[in-house]
Image (spheres, rainbow, N blue to C red):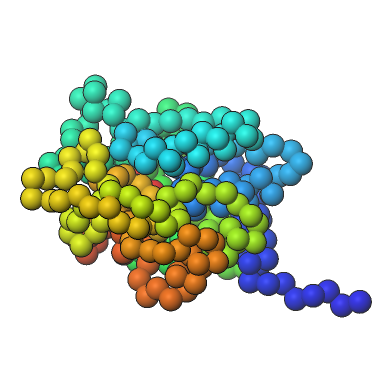
Amino acid sequence: MSTPPMSHLDALESEAVHIFREVAGEFERPVILFSGGKDSIVMLHLALKAFAPAPVPFPLLHVDTGHNFPEVLAHRDRIVDTYGLTLHVASVQDHIDRGALKERPDGTRNPLQTLPLTEAIRTERFDAVFGGGRRDEEKARAKERVFSLRDEFSQWDPRRQRPELWQLYNGRHAPGEHVRVFPLSNWTELDVWQYIAREHIGLPSIYFAHHREVFSRGGMWLTAGEWGGPRADETPEKRQVRYRTVGDMSCTGAVDSDAETLDQVIAEIAASRITERGATRADDRMSEAAMEDRKREGYF
């Protein structure tokens, strides 16, 4: 009997599982960046598959801005408890309190995550850091290899990218350097949602349409919070929305949506002609090269 052909989701899953196992064999202290968002949840699901029935041999790391969505943090903690995982939390607020960082005038803390992240990597001596970035999200992320070398200051140099022919990954690095690893590089947003549906993966409720009080700023629907919104000239209103991506509340916008189920979300994404970061992330609009500039400094 002939073997049925591998589906595109099977191929993506197989590639990601191979990447996790490759890192386990090449590195001493890997860590998985885990925010409780959809991409990091899918990444953890793949890690669980890669090492089953043994536990995942890596801890998790979350850079907490202090302005995260409560629903997402609650989901993060449920997953950590369910699988008995170790979670390291690097706090932006702690760095502000001790004077290492200053609040920005616009209230957003997403760009402030770089220092807590790089300090946690250095302090814990992590030599491989898994991230959920995908090439379809943003042009700077499209430049990165699956194994992305960072120097002793956690900075990224596009000119030091290494070839990755035939899925051969070069994890060689000097003392003090580390490698960012992106198992979902070749996935699209639609792939992620189709895989979530196939694998019956649970997500925070804000990824599905719900009624929420929001206000308009810069062409996006933002949620009010202690970070500084709304201003006097911004009027909150109740709308049916959902989130395509989650991050700092100050720069992550919701989209108008009727998609309450996985099938409806998949249909909505299939019809979309703009990426989730392009549609809902104000921090990527700061300049034409905003993401690439942050990545050069050590950002995700």
256 and 167: which is toward the camera: 256
- Residue 272 in percent (x, y) is at 40, 73
Give the quadrant of residue 100: top left
The one of 250 and 155 positioned closer to us in this rendering = 250
- From this viewpoint, which residue is outermost toward the right? 1
- Residue 26: image location, x then y, percent: 62, 45
Where, quadrant-wise, is the N terminus in this rendering? bottom right
Confirm whether residue 294 shows in the render.
no
- Please identify the quarter of the rendering in which residue 51 is found: top right
Is 8 placed above or below 182 here?
below
Identify the residue shown where x is 24% and y is 43%.
224
Q: How many marks?
A: 0
In the rendered image, which quarter is residue 71 located in? Answer: top left
Compared across the picture, whether 175 is left or right of 218 comes to: right
The residue at 37%/75% (across/down) is 273
- The residue sitting at 79% across, 75% down in the picture is 4
Which residue reaches farthest left? Answer: 233
Q: In this rendering, does residue 219 appear at all?
A: yes
In the shown orientation, is residue 118 left or right of residue 286?
A: right
- Give whichever of 299, 85 is nearer the camera: 85
Residue 106 picture location, percent across and down: 15, 45
Closest to the observer, 164 or 200: 200
Residue at position x 33%, y 61% from top?
Answer: 255
